[in-house]
Amino acid sequence: MTDPFSPGDDDLSAPRPGGIAARALAAARGSPDWLAALNPEQREAVETLDGPLLALAGAGTGKTRVLTSRIAHILALGRARPHEILAVTFTNKAAREMRERIAMLIGPAAEGMGWLGTFHAISAKILRRHAELVDLKSNFTILDTDDQIRLLKQVLKAENIDEKRWTARVLAYLIDNWKNRGLDARHVPAGEAQAFANGKGAALYTLYQERLKTLNAVDFGDLLLETLRLLRENPDVLRDYQQRFKFILVDEYQDTNAAQYLWLRLLVQRAEPSQPQNLCCVGDDDQSIYGWRGADVDNILRFETDFPGAKVVRLERNYRSTGHILAAASHLIARNRDRLGKTLFTDGEWGEKVTVAGVWDSEEEARVVGEEIEQLQRQGASLDDMAILVRASFQMREFEERFINLGLPYKVIGGPRFYERLEIRDALAYLRCVAQPADDLAFERIVNTPKRGLGESTLQTVHEYARLSRIPLMQAARALVETEELKPKPRGALRTLLGDFSRWSAQIAEKPHYELAEQVLEESGYTDFWKQERTVEAEGRLENLKELIRSMEEFPDLGAFLEHVSLVMDVENNEAGARVSIMTLHGAKGLEFDTVFLPGWEEGLFPHQRSLDENGRAGLEEERRLAYVGVTRARRRAKILFASNRRIHGLWQSTVPSRFVDDLPVDHVQVRDEARSGGSYGAYAQSRFANIDAFGSTYETPGWKRARSRAEQTRASEKGAPSSRGPKTIEGEVLSRAAPAGKFAPGARIFHQKFGSGSVAAVDGSKLTIDFDKAGRKLVLDTFVELRG
DNA sequence: GATGGGCAAGTTTTT
DNA sequence: CTTGCCCATC
């Protein structure tokens, strides 16, 4: 993370807050530091406290400074106490940065900001306080995408839906979409529900929600949706929060989806129309690049209508980039129709023109970028100040290969995150089972990891019993091991595992949670499982597990840790040394670099064909905003490239330059001199010969390893999924088979799927002792037995 | 119950 | 060309 107030972060010219100049200025004007450091527009956005306010903050215009100064201002004036301010961001990173920057302005009082966080984290906090009002227990589990898909697979299987034709992934996408729009199953538009599995869309959505409730779990979408429901159905609760939050601030408002909009609108409503709605939204319609995941630009475009009397402040003075870069970006984005319209300007220098270079193919592209980076390095530039921003992640590989070849240090931003790693997810599943024995998804994940001989058929039996009795898997397993429904080997293995869990759970209160965690991983055989691998990769995984345990020490207990992990946990990429960053354009939003390389500006790739096909002009405009985001990341140098040939799906295809290249203003662009290094064709010829055999050890490069481990993780994360290929009936019908208590009296004739016919010898609750005609005397559960007249 | 071969599909990503 | 996922085999 960059130092929040380092020169160039937001300001090239304004005095550093807290610095001597700022203090001197403040003293002279008689106003506090944070006001003295602002330009007139920023100051207006900070000081207009009453009523709705929209700050349209262009790239690099000091948007975070406005938000943090505004909070400092509110607190300094005593208009609210820290816990009476609701400040919402999208990412944890943004929340963390905001907290740090507020702390720099006002000191430790920032700690009291209990309601500064992401939409999801704040929703979770509200939900846990009132869980029972929406049929949850306050220790509910938050499922991530992976769990969500596994659950949906179960639902699809139970409903006998062809999973090849209608995948869980697609259904997850649909449900997410509905949730993003604030729609529960009853309100899904008929046409959209029709589109999935011959009209079963809405029904599957309902079933999925029912499964979530029985698991005492919510997915990310539910955090918002259930909070909405909670607030709508409980006016007293709503009123409490409305009164609590005297000021509401929202970052990146252009990224809000419909559900988040409704959420905000509820909380900002005032009992008396005369009371001002103190809502301050900061955003930039030109940087709305998440439409495809439900963000609705209309929210920001509609602001003045939604909140009558709203004040709109435009922040157009850019403190980041040089004149040519801003001119190029502004000209480009001006081609969009759906925008509120603003133009960035700077008092700074013009600097270098934006460069555009055509190359023969993607190999040459990587080589040219590599050369330029080395040259900048020779001129004294740091690799930390350079980034390559690509449209799609497959473009990264070519750069990685080239940089490895050159020995040029690089880092890929946005790879797999820490908590998405296989070993971390496994370890967390163990801990979830210890903390929340009803967490079926976690149990399924680790029941046979490491291998214990508890395969599909065993799990199948446990599943069936759990469903029939409507109890969690672990509880069902406990009942089953008391009987002879299972074969001796799995039965013994299961009994051992369950014994382990009882022992661990009993120790929750007794020893520190991080020690318990270590013990769990040790005793379950999980660490041994990796130790036996004896590979470099396994060592890395063991390291990660250690890191996980270490990070647990920062939390008071297991519950707090698990909450943090499902919502917040991030990767810390703290490898020493300066490195070039490689990342997607989406991942680059909010960041800035001296030099930015923008490769792959070709039709079909950027703008991406699929965007155009699926969303037409809106799609094109979003792609153009992405281009705008890319160019405005640059402080001093923006370098655009396009290739004439690119390998797509293994085939070389010839490509044409992106229309965005033509959207750039000629006066501010320098087309790269073709004669340089023998022209692109000459360079192409060189590349052919230089590179053909350069990657003999391709499979050992970090890029490959990364790709491979990513693949492995997803594969492995799926293998624990149970395939309840069981009774081809819907739950209700199966349930009717459940035996009412006392149905089996000694002497009754019965039939068992596995053991055949027999007669009841003794009854002990749900456990029956049966003399089977062929199999002899067995202890079985009544749900697996049918009465025979 | 584990393991390997064969087949569709292939942007962007946070919570 | 690659990669994830399903199914058939030992």
Image (tube, coloured by chain):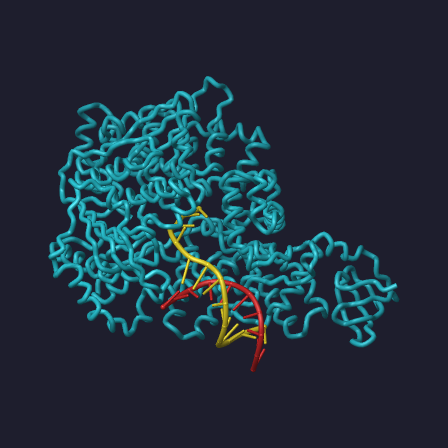
Chain colours: A cyan, B yellow, C red
Whole-percent x, y for residue A354 in the image:
18, 45
Asked if one can make out residue A125 in the rendered structure from this viewpoint, the answer is no
Q: Residue A148 vs residue A495: left or right?
A: left
Q: Nearer the viewer, residue A185 or A439?
A: A185
Q: Quadrant of the C terminus of chain A?
A: bottom right
Whole-percent x, y for residue A588 in the image:
31, 48
- Residue extending furthest top? A274
Q: Is residue A716 above or below residue A269?
A: below
Q: Is residue A176 above or below residue A365?
A: above
Q: Is residue A99 above or below residue A457?
A: above
Q: Residue A285 vs residue A387: left or right?
A: right
Q: Residue A731 vs residue A512: left or right?
A: right
Number of numbered tags placed on the structure image: 0
The residue drawn where x is 20% and y is 38% is: A327
Q: Is residue A761 above or below residue B12?
A: below
The residue drawn where x is 44% and y is 45% is: A293
The residue drawn where x is 14% and y is 57% is: A375
Q: Nearer the viewer, residue A477 or A700?
A: A700
Asked if one can make out residue A260 in the rendered structure from this viewpoint, the answer is yes
Q: Nearer the viewer, residue A469 or A5?
A: A469
Q: Residue A520 vs residue A6: left or right?
A: right
Location of residue A395 by image quarter: bottom left
Whole-percent x, y for residue A540 in the image:
38, 66
Whole-percent x, y for residue A642 in the image:
24, 53
